[in-house]
Image: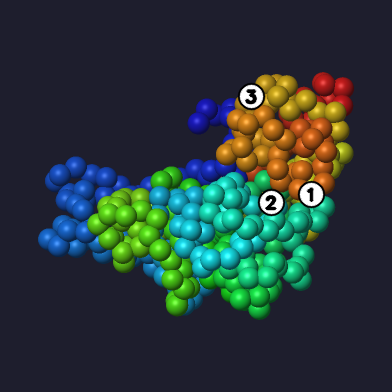
Amino acid sequence: MPADFIYLDHQATTPLAPEAREAMLPWLAGPESMGFANPHSMHRAGRAAAAAVEVAREQVASLLPKGGRVIFTSGATEALNQAIRSVPRGPIAYSAIEHSAVVNAVLATSEAAQELPVSTSGLVDPEIEFAEGTGLVAVMQVNNEIGTIQLVERLASRAHEAGALFLCDAVQGAGKLAPPEGADLIAVTAHKLYGPKGIGALWVRDGVKVGELIHGGGQEGGLRSGTLSPALCAGFGAAAALAKERMEVDFQHLSGLAELARSILSRWSVNGSETARWPGNLNLRLDGLNFPRLLSDCRQIAFSAGSACGSGTGAPSRVLSAIGLEAKEARNSIRLGFGRYTTREEVETACHAIEAAAQAQGV
């Protein structure tokens, strides 16, 4: 990354932690190391690779509730699809601010879906009623666009009272907050917690049955066919272990960065709750702002208008619309994402540049 470039888009992806990279290297070496072996082979090299996979599985599991198992996947999108396509028949309820991986999988799977509204703060009412016969309730732990933290434990309890399973997209919360206790299914991905891209996991509570999404050789206990990458697993595991170790330190660091950013961008409004939010996510609005021009004038800073997955549609953010913003207001918004390696100097420089560029627009 160029020395003058400031990365503030950690909701889209995080840089690979040096510790994760080091854990991956032995499994990326050439034939002299045998690190390339197939972890599903029975010979010595294969068993060594399989052992590395199992160490990683335990490290990832340490971020999640007890009493469940970790199934490695290609990422959270696959994990969410597998969970949603495995539920018993019946309506599926999902929050209005779920990631597209949930929304589109639900709409493609369920003939009867219930969209759960959110308040202007971006929160689902924890006492909300679900449609009769609901088989699954899906509510994310931390929203990827506005950073709001849901009361997932209470929502899980309400889902169980209604006879439904509870699915939690914990992509933005895993390794950063306590795990969503009470969930039956949890989706996570490595590249949002300083691990490699291309690997995620579905956590399944003991006693909950899920079906195959990918058919083949029956790997991952017959639930996810395909040859696992020991390198990706090792990187994911190392990143998870580091996140657990640094959870409190990272939280305090990000809280300080958010406070600094708010002090500089004091005239901007916060989208979503100001208190029930992850401090690494700051979604701000300034009336009259021209976002494409702001992005062009601040080329040395990586930030966004919202989800990277929806950046090419041109439509206003579905999440910002759900909390009551008009299309124009949604287009006047930006998302700043801070991370473990973001410095106070970077935040100060970036926020002053963004404020100056906004003032140059006359807003």
**Extreme residue in the front direction:** 111
Query: Residue 148: x, y in percent?
Result: 71, 55
Q: Name the residue under label 1.
A: 323
Q: How crowded is mark 1: few (under 14 residues within 10 Å), some or many (20 or more)?
A: many
Tell me what residue is drawn at x 57 percent, y 39 percent: 309
For the residues carrying marks 3 and 1, which lies nearer the camera in this image? 1
Residue at mark 3 = 299
Residue at x 54% of width, y 29% of height: 3
Kindly tell me whether residue 127 is visible in this rendering.
yes
At mark 2, the secondary structure is loop
Residue type at mark 1: give it.
Ile
Q: Can residue 274 be seen in this view?
A: no
Q: Distance between the residues labelled 3 and 1?
A: 29 Å
Query: Which mark is in front, 3 or 2?
Result: 2
Residue 164 placed where, x, y %? 60, 72
Residue at disc 1, secondary structure: loop
Residue sitting nearer the eye, 82 or 261: 82
Q: Which amino acid does label 2 sit on?
A: Ile
| Percent x, y of residue 162 | 66, 75
Tell me if 155 is positioned left or right of 120 in this view.
left
Whole-percent x, y for residue 120 in the image: 82, 52
